Amino acid sequence: MTDHEIIDGLRSANQLLQSRAVDVLLKQVKEPLIHYVKQNSGTRAEGLDIASEAVVVLWKSDGEGKFQLRADVKLSTWCVSVGRNLWLKELRRRKTWSGDNLGGDARNEPADGTTPEEIIIAVEDHDLVSGEIRRAWRAFKKLSAGCQQLFQADLEARPEEEIMRLLEVTNMGSVKVKRHRCKEKWIGLYKQEPISMPIRETEAATDERGS
Amino acid sequence: MNEGAEHMRRERIEAFVTGRLTEVERSAFEAEMRADETLRAEVEIERVLQSTLQRAPELRFRELVQQVSEAQEKVSTRDGGVGGTVIPIERGRWMWWAAASVFLLLGAGVLTWYIMPQDRSALAMRFAEEHVPRRVRGGHGTDPRHDSSLVRLWQLRANGDAAGYLSATERLLRTDSSFQALHGDVVRTERMMVLLGMGNVSEALEERARVPDGSPSPCELDLVDGLIATLQGREEVAVQALQQAVRGGCVRAEELDGLLP
């Protein structure tokens, strides 16, 4: 699969094509990033997370028109560079959070001075998904198909007529009632969901760091 | 609080979080918030839900990446690619050679038995995903009332929105008897292809059971049977059915490249 085909696959609305593209790209970037993360205070699991995160950054940057496929830079090189910088950002975040007590290799955190500006911006703009959003998303997926479609239609600002047709109702009043009930249901499910961590800050991470 | 009042309260919270209140309304709302802890908590939850909705496309993509990554890890662990024990050559050369021989033999077996059918399954899914039935008899005429539905279905399929296509066709076939009479045969055949494109053999079989043999197109049904058998790993049956479909004229042999010997 060429870089162009991978990008086409990532852009596709077809999940099968998207999966193929993700599969190929992940295979290209996973091992270099796991190696890098493990060399810099991390674990294999964290390396895997960073590889996935790098693919997400590419997908987002491309969707926002901030990514340009260039003949002189391979897609995998771009993603590996993003991944390395994401890991450095994560180390910085942990240092700040824990008062710089990581120890070991983290103290010798490498400076990736060769990173192009566009990658630095992409990484800086990238927000991890918070634990709360993950919790809300898990609850969202437990909603009925009708409720999910309704929220999706709202998000896409679909015309009222289309929403009424979708819900098989004849007036907007019924849509409002349905929306209200769906929201109440979502809030209820959200409250039942356990709280989750923003990124795999695992016990394993601490264990492996220690070893 | 009754549902109407609760509804209005919820709408105000939404309007506040999404910035749709006027300056005066916003100030009043903020004053209420300062005095009401429950309201503050509800606003926080609303903020999270709104952010989640805004990030829904990204969250879906993340899930896909996660699924692919986990699948890769499973394969890697199963094949012993990661974390396997290495036998030092100097300490056990004969063991190393024995292990290597066993590995090679196993590898050859796995390649024949496992990887090849996997490739055929992927080819079958890709074919089904893209195949548009050609030799399916339509109904007994057309009805302009269905035009927009048909265009919508075509768009869903062209965009690869399999779930959208299946849900829309299911609804049309269930609720619109005129649509079913005119387009049911084509749509049911296409639904089978969409399901097979997703690798969903069980639902494709259910759909297949709803279509009697000989109708609407024996050739397309041979093709469906061949793809189902391929995905089930029943090679002989698959080849027979696919060859039958080629003879029936609804598919060319070269389109089935990799699926026929």
Image (spheres, coloured by chain):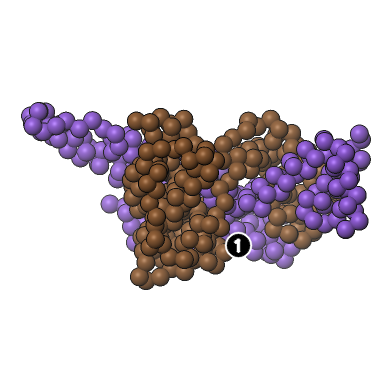
Q: In the image, B132: left or right of B184?
A: left
Q: Does residue B38 lie above or below B135 as drawn?
A: above
Task: Decide if residue A178 is on the left or right side of residue B108.
Answer: right
Q: Is there any visible trace of residue A125 in the rendered image?
A: yes
User: Which residue lies at the image location 82% right of the left edge and 51% below the top edge?
Assistant: B16
Q: Nearer the viewer, residue A172 or A138?
A: A138
Q: As drawn, is A193 to the left or to the right of A183?
A: left
> In the rendered image, which residue does mark 1 sit on?
B155
Q: How many marks?
A: 1
Report which quarter residue B20 is drawn in: bottom right
Residue depicted at x 30% and y 37% = B82
Specify the amino acid type for callout 1: Gln
x, y percent for residue B192: 52, 48
Chain B painted colour: purple
Chain letter, colour brown: A
The answer to whether residue A44 shows anywhere in this view is no
Q: Quadrant of the C terminus of chain A?
A: top left
Viewer-proximal residue among A18 and A119 = A119
From the viewer's perspective, tell me whether residue B247 is left or right of residue A184: left
Q: Residue at x 43, y 41 (%)?
A: A46
Residue B92 versus residue A139 in the image, above or below:
above
Given the image, what chain letter belongs to the residue carrying mark 1? B
Q: Nearer the viewer, residue B48 or B178?
A: B48
Does A119 appear above or below A91? below
Instruction: Indicate the position of residue B168 as horizontal and vertical percent values.
Output: 66, 52
Residue sitting at x 72%, y 39%: A186
Q: Position of residue B79 (x, y in %)?
A: 29, 36
Q: Residues within 10 Å of mark 1 (few under 14, many from 20)?
A: few
